[in-house]
Amino acid sequence: MKKVLISSQSEKQGSAKQVLILTSKTGGGHESLAQAIKEGLEKEFQIEIFDGLPTLAAKIYGFVHLYLPTFFNLAYRLADNKPAAKILHFFSFLLTYPSLRKINFEDFDLILSVQPFLTEEIAWLNPKKFIVFIADPVSISQVWLCPKADLTFVATEEGKKLCLKKGLPKRKIVVSGFPVRQQFLKKLPKKEKSKFTILVGGSGYGVRETKEIIKNLKNKNIQIIAVCGRSKSLQKSLPQRKNIKIFGFVKNMAELMTGCHLIIGKAGPNLLFESIALGIPFLATGYPPEQEKGNIELIKKYQIGFVEENPQKAAELIKELAKNPKKLEKLKPNIQKLAKVHKMAPKIIASQIAYLLENSIAAKRR
C-alpha cells in the first residue's frame, strides 16, 4: 500500500477519472474492503489506495480491540452520539493530519473513505468530491456519519434505516450491497471434499474462540482449515494433527474456502459476505464487538447460518452438522438469494460515482 501519493497533472489529463480510496490497517477488514472496491471500480477509474491512519493508531486500536474488549465496547457505546463523535473526530484529525497532508487532493477527482476516522477529517480538508462506504453493514455508529460527504454507501436496508434515524439525509444514502474481492466472484473449480471440511478464520478478535473450537474438535472425520491471518501466536498454538491444515496470512482465501461445508469465525463483514458470495453457510462464534452485533442478527434474519458464542458448544454444533449435512443444504437457497443482491455492489458503486462526477462537470459548465 502506498505511503505517499503523488499524481502529476500532466499524467492525469486525458486519462480516466482519479479516485483515491482511504483505508487503514486496523484489523485487516478495512484493507480487504478497500481492495474489493478497487477491483470493482478499476475498469472505469484510475484507483489508488492510501492508509490514512498512523501506525501508532493502528497498533493502539488492535491492542484495545483484542485485549480490552470490554473497554472497546464501552467506548463504542459512549461515542455513538453526535457530541461525542465530534470530539473524537477532532482528536483524530490532530492524529491523522501529518499523514493526510501527504495527499495532494487536487490530483484526485474523488475521495472514497472506508474508515470511520477518515470521514469528518477529510471533509475538513475540502476535497472536490468526497464519499463514504460504511464498512459495518448493520450496526452503524454515529462516528461513521458525515453530512458533508456527497454520498454515503451502506450495505443493507437495515443500515440505511439506522443512518436515517441518526440524521443523515435520505438523498445522500445509497444501498449498494457489500462488495467482495473478485476472487470470490469468479467461478472456481468445484472441489468435492471427501471429508466434512470447515474453514476457521481466527485473526484479530476471534483468536481465543478459534483456539477453543479447534481444541474441542477431535473428530478425525472433520477436516479443518485454520487461517490465522497475521496472528503468529495463534499459528504456533494450534495442535498439530493430520486433519488440521494451518495457514497464516493468505491471498488465496477464495480457493481455500471453495468446497468447504461451513465457514466459522467472528461475524466480521468481510468473511461473512465472502462466505455468502461462495454460497457457504456461516457459523458466527465468540462475543462480537459492538459494531458486529448487527451481523449476528443478519445471519438469523436471513437464515444463512448459525450463531453460537460458546466455543465448546460451537464445537459440538460442528460435530452435529458433520453428521447431518442436510441441515446445511437447507440454508443454501437463502444464501444464494442474498448473494445475488450483494454481487451487484461494485456496479452500483461505480454507476453512482460516475453520475456524481458527471453532474459535477455539468454544473461547472453552466
Image (cartoon, grey):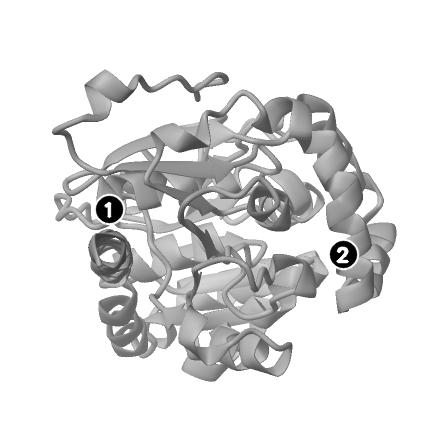
Q: Identify residue type, mark 1.
A: Gly
Identify which residue is drawn at 22% across, 25% down.
Answer: 12
Q: Quadrant of residue 238?
A: top right
- Give residue 5's position: percent from left, percent from top: 43, 20
The 10 Å Cα crowd at callout 2, few under 14, some 14 to 19, many 20 or more, is some
Q: Report the residue marked by disc 1.
A: 40
The 10 Å Cα crowd at callout 1, few under 14, some 14 to 19, many 20 or more, is many
Identify which residue is drawn at 25% across, 77% down.
Answer: 333
Q: Report the residue marked by disc 2.
A: 86
Identify which residue is drawn at 58% across, 49% down.
Answer: 119
- Give residue 267's position: percent from left, percent from top: 55, 59
- Give residue 106's position: percent from left, percent from top: 40, 31
Element class at badge 2: helix
Q: Identify residue type, mark 2.
A: Lys
Q: Quadrant of residue 15?
A: top left
Q: Specify whether 63 is left or right of 174.
A: right
Measured in 3D between alpha carbons, the distance from the residue under mark 2 to the one under mark 1, in whole angstroms, is: 32 Å
Q: Nearer the viewer, residue 303 or 165?
A: 165
The reply to whether residue 324 is in sight is no
Q: Quadrant of the N terminus?
A: top left
Q: Is residue 323 above or below residue 222?
A: below
Q: Is residue 203 above or below residue 132?
A: above
Q: Nearer the viewer, residue 54 or 28?
A: 54
Q: Nearer the viewer, residue 324 or 131?
A: 131
Q: Quadrant of the C terminus?
A: bottom left
Q: Are marks 2 and 1 in contact (CB under 8 Å)?
A: no
Identify which residue is drawn at 45% across, 25% down.
Answer: 104
The reply to whether residue 75 is in sight is yes
Q: Specify whether 202 is left or right of 7.
A: right
Q: Nearer the viewer, mark 2 or mark 1?
A: 2
